[in-house]
Every structure is written in C-alpha cells, then in structure tokens.
Amino acid sequence: MPKYQVTREQRMLLAWSRFQEIVQPLLLTAPRLSWDQVDRSLVYYMTMHVIDMPWMNHLAFLVAISTCHARLDVRTVKQRLQVLHRGWKTIFSAYKMIDFAEWNPAEHLQRYMNDQALEASLHTRQEFLSTYTASTRSVEMYLRSLPEGERVVYRQWELPLLPAGMREHLARHKDVQEVQAQRRKAESDAVTPHFSRIRGEAHVRWNEINRLRQKFREVIALVQSGQAEWTPLVW
C-alpha cells in the first residue's frame, strides 16, 4: 500500500489548527491584527518549536504585530522569531527560569551578555540584544495605538523595555567587527601558502576548457559548411 504524503499546504493547515488550540484566544482577536495576514510558515515554526515554552504567547503576539502593525516582511519576522526563541531557550535554561514573568531584561540581559560560562558567541549575543530591542519598540508602538481599555488587556504580553541607555552600554559592535575581521584574516592566511598552487591549477584547467571550447567551435564550423555531418547521440 503506497504511503500517504502530506503536502505543504496540508501541513500549514494542520499547524494553524493546532496553533489556535494552544495560543491565548485573546491574541487571535487582538484589535488591528489579522492572523489571515500572518505567513503560515511562521505559525508552523511556532507549533513545531515554541509550543509549551513560557514565551509562546509573547512571541505569537510579536509575530502578529510585526506582520500587521509594523508591516515587516516575512524574512525579518522569522528572524525575530528564531533569534528570540533560541536566545530565551539559552537564558531560561542557564538561569533556571520557568515562567515568563521571571524574565527581567535589565538583569538577565546583563548576565547573558557577559556570562563566559555560556557557549553563545559574541555575534549571537549581540544579535539577540538588537533583535529584542527592536521587538520591544514594535510591541510598545502597537500598544500605544490602542485605546486605554484594550491597552490594559494586551499589555500582559508586552516585552519589557530595557532601561534607558542600557542597550548602548551592552552593545559591542566594534568587538563583533573585530572578531569578524580576525576570522576573515585567519581564513585568508590559511589559503595564502597554497595560492601559487591554486593559481597554477586554475590556469591548467582554464587552458583545458579553452581548448575544448575551441574544438567545439571548429566542429560546429565544419557542420555548418557541409564538411562534416551532425550525428545525434543515441542514449
């Protein structure tokens, strides 16, 4: 009996159905946010990876806001979703947190950015910091656009803002650039000793390709002039 294969469209529909069961119902009817506009691949990601996580509703809220209110493209929204999810997995596990109410960016971001015991790279930490900061602004702008009564209801899923000046204090863009420059230098240093051999090999191969190209042109010219007959290949 042939196996029944689920199509991408069917997977997306199943994910959407499952998502509606696990997300806070109020988020599905949030004012000025239409889940019809949210790309189903984002819903699929959340049902596959974020389900049962303390930040499930907060990320769902952010995805809807980023799509419908901030009007970001799918690629950017997915980047936000994945970066925050991976970052929180690391942070919550490292600092033994269970509930999202325990999340205090002023404390935990400070620790995360400087915790040498964590395996997260400098680039990963800086990316989380930048993504979190941008996401808090999007959520805050959306909440401010709501009437006071609705704002009170939906503020429970906001992302706490960083204290003024903290992002600039934690940002280490120059360090990231220096690490990237050192990596590029190490990669080029690894190739430099072999450059002459690589160039020689490339030259030999170019000559072989050029001779083949010339021979091909000669054969085409003979066929076109009637001096040779074209014989199709039989496979």
Image (cartoon, helix red, strand yellow):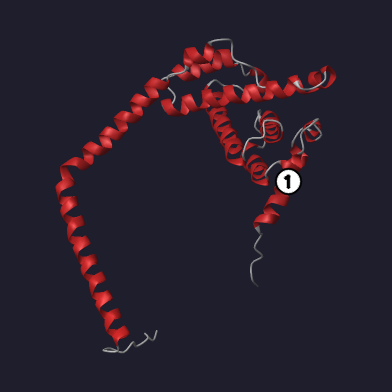
Q: Which residue is mark 1?
A: 16
In percent of width and height, residue 21 lies at: 77, 40
Q: Residue furthest top?
A: 164
Above-or-below relation of 9 to 215: above
In percent of width and height, residue 104 lies at: 61, 15
Q: Quick check: can you spot residue 140?
A: yes
Residue at 57 percent across and 13 percent down: it is 106
Q: Residue furthest front?
A: 225
Q: Where is residue 102, by image quadrant?
A: top right
In percent of width and height, residue 1 lies at: 65, 73
Residue at 46 percent across and 29 percent down: it is 124
Q: Please name the amino acid that badge 1 sits on.
A: Trp
Query: Secondary structure beneath disc 1?
Result: helix
Q: Residue furthest right?
A: 149
Above-or-below relation of 104 to 131: above
* Residue in the foreground of this view, choosing between 93 and 222: 222
Residue at 25 percent across and 38 percent down: it is 188
Assess disc 1: are there few (<14), some (14-19) or many (≥20) residues with their C-alpha within 10 Å of its C-alpha: some
* Residue in the foreground of this view, choosing between 145 and 91: 145
* Residue in the foreground of this view, choosing between 18 and 181: 181
Q: Where is residue 189, by image quadrant?
A: top left
**Position of residue 124 in the picture relative to residue 202 (left or right):** right
Position of the C terminus by quadrant: bottom left
Q: Quick check: can you spot residue 119?
A: no
* Residue in the foreground of this view, choosing between 228 and 2: 228
